[in-house]
Each structure stands twice: as C-alpha cells, then as structure tokens.
Amino acid sequence: MDNYFNKLVGVSAAQMPGTEKAFSGIIKNFDLIIELGTDNGGLSVWIYSNKKADAAFYTYELDPSHVKIPKDHAVNDCINYCDCLSLDTVNSISALVGSSGKTLILCDGGCKVKEFEIYSKFLKSGDVIMLHDFADSPNEIQNYKDIKAKCLSEGFWDGKGYDVHESSLESIKPYIDAAGLKKHNYKKFLNVLWGSFIKA
Ligand SMILES: C[S@@+](CC[C@H](N)C(=O)[O-])C[C@H]1O[C@@H](n2cnc3c(N)ncnc32)[C@H](O)[C@@H]1O
C-alpha cells in the first residue's frame, strides 16, 4: 500500500490518512509552526504549502538521511538538522515562541512526552501544542488499536507495524496541569492519533 502522504504531496509521512483534513481547519490560525521530527518530510511539505503565507515554519531532524524531500523544494530552508532536546535548540525555540504571534508546536520526534514536557512550558496564552502517536486514557492500548482498526476497515492502513502508542493523556497529565493547558479540538485530532492542547 502506497503511503497516503506520498500520494498527497509526493513525500511520505508517518501520519494517518485524514491528518491533513484535521490540520486544514486550524493551520492558518498560526504565525509560527514548529515541527519536532521531520523524518521523510511529508507532513513538513504539507504544512509549508498550507500555512498562512507569512507564517514562519521550522522543522527539526536529528538524522539528515531520513529526509526525502526533493532538494529544490523551498521547505528545505525550514529544516534544522539538530537535536530538538539539546539546550541550544530548546533555548532557540523558546526565544522564537516568545517573540512570535500565535504558535503551534508539534511534538513528533523520538520522545514525544519529553518534548511535550519541555516545550509546553514556553507557550503563551492561545498557543497550541500537540503530540503524536497519542492515545486517550484510560484504556490507552485499546483506544489506539480501535483507531488503527477503523483505518484498516476503511482500507487506509495495511495493518503492519506502529501498533503501540507513544504518548497518552495519563503520561502528560503533570505537564498539562503545570502549564495550564486545556484539551483543544480533542476528538478531531484523537481520530488521527494526535493529542491537542491549548494554553489558557
Ligand atoms: C515519527 S518520525 C517524524 C514523523 C514526521 N513528523 C511525519 O509526520 O512524517 C520521528 C523523527 O524524529 C527524529 N528524531 C528523533 N529524536 C530526535 C531529536 N532528539 N531531535 C530531532 N529529531 C529527532 C527521528 O530521526 C525521526 O526521523
């Protein structure tokens, strides 16, 4: 089965079919968009092509060999090859968030919960943070499987791999409370395996 995002934008993404429909309702609300974990780059290409024209976009990737975006695509200028958990990167992203308008942070690197813990602290009122491979709590394992099964039944998913969630409502509860976050478009993004929260 071909990758859904490959068909959509010409580059694969580790995303569920329909992810772009959920994001299309909100992507133009933001002045700054940060994606932690570029990988092949399908979601990066989609964000770059669908964001507000003057919105800033930065995506972060540890391993350049993962990126499959054609070299002449303008989104390459938005890629930062570095560790999104390093002190330098954390400081530079925190400064960006502090000096920009409405911000969206997408935690989709190697450790979503850690990324959420770190970056939720820098949000301003009205900023949104999301984390991927997310399952609602309680019953995370079943909740995650149910969403995958729905995609399988609709012919979207080949059913191989990625059967385990990487983050859950329970795992981020202390950081939600500490940062004063609320669920935001929660059901809509849960259906494509993203947890979505807004700073009150
Ligand atoms: C799940 S993939 C990202 C998927 C991508 N956002 C998409 O929608 O297709 C995770 C990526 O994060 C990268 N990564 C892991 N740890 C990282 C870190 N500390 N800093 C930056 N990138 C990291 C991995 O190399 C991998 O390419």
Image: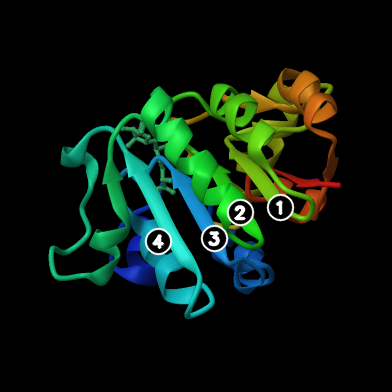
Kind of residue sitting beneath label 4: Phe
In percent of width and height, residue 98 lies at 60, 48
Query: Splitting the image into 4 quarters, where does residue 49 fall?
Result: bottom left
- Give the mark, 4 or 2, whose residue is nearer the N terminus: 4
In percent of width and height, residue 28 lies at 61, 74
Query: Splitting the image into 4 quarters, where does residue 122 fall?
Result: top right
> Which residue position holds label 1?
127
- Give the mark, 1 or 2, whose residue is nearer the N terminus: 2
> Which residue position holds label 2?
104
Marks 1/4: CA distance? Answer: 26 Å
Q: Nearer the viewer, residue 165 or 115?
A: 115
Numbered label tally: 4
- Give the mark, 3 or 4, whose residue is nearer the N terminus: 4
| Dot 4 beta carbon under 8 Å from ligand 1 | yes
- The numbered mark at residue 32 is 3
Q: Secondary structure at mark 4?
A: helix
Determine whether label 3 and label 2 are within 8 Å by CB. Answer: yes
| Dot 3 beta carbon under 8 Å from ligand 1 | no
Between circles 3 and 2, the one closer to the viewer is 3
Residue in view at x 29 percent, y 34 percent: 82
Marks 3/2: CA distance? Answer: 6 Å
Q: Residues within 10 Å of mark 1 (few under 14, many from 20)?
A: many
| Residue 84 to residue 50: above or below | above
